[in-house]
Amino acid sequence: MKLSFNKNGLPNNHPITYLSDGSFGNQRSDGDFRMSFANSTLLLNFLKRTRECTSCEGYFPFNLKGVNSFHISLDHSIDGSLVVDFDHDERNSYGAFSDINLMERYQDIENQRIGYGNMTAGQLVRFGLGQYARIEKEKIVGIIICFK
């Protein structure tokens, strides 16, 4: 399985809601395939028919010890869609695990943003309402979620 960015695609229009228990997600997820990541509480939801990411969800309490506070910039982003390319045996499953390491976690409390992975490398792409990925050498190196 491989994740890629389609610059000709449209970002999903599903806003992500942050709840008081530290969980976040979309109240209406139409995805039928989920992807989890190494060392992360983040899940991406995809629609198999289009292979595009429809939303994300996870758990990330603000002010958690061990989480770096950092101004997460959204400057110079481009729009498109996040697409999954299935391996043959994954087409009939409901989910997959990615070895992309998103272990580093960041919080930008002032701007209500959270980040997983690398927050500065590569190109910033908006793949949904308040949903961004950092892509370097055609690989995802970071995910940013905005709650405003």
Image (cartoon, rainbow, N blue to C red):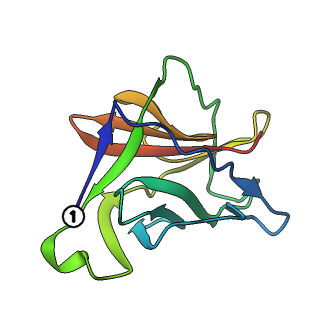
- The picture places residue 2, in percent across and down from the top left corner, at 23, 57
Nearer-the-camera pick, 32 or 78: 32
In the rendered view, tell whether residue 36 sits above or below residue 64.
below
Nearer-the-camera pick, 111 or 13: 13
Question: Residue at coordinates 48% horizontally, 61% vertically from top-left?
Answer: 44
Type of the residue with mark 1: Met
> Pointer 1: residues within 10 angstroms few (<14), some, or many (20+)?
some
Is residue 15 left or right of 83 when viewed as pictured?
Answer: right
Question: Residue at coordinates 77% horizontally, 39% vertically from top-left?
Answer: 148
Quarter of the image that includes the N terminus = bottom left
- The residue sitting at the front extreme is 49
Is residue 128 left or right of 147 when viewed as pictured?
Answer: left
Q: Quadrant of residue 66?
A: bottom right
The answer, for residue 35, to whether it is visible in the render is: yes
In the rendered view, tell whether residue 2 sits above or below residue 48.
above
User: Where does label 1 land, which residue?
Assistant: 1
- The picture places residue 25, in percent across and down from the top left corner, at 67, 62
The answer, for residue 38, to whether it is visible in the render is: no
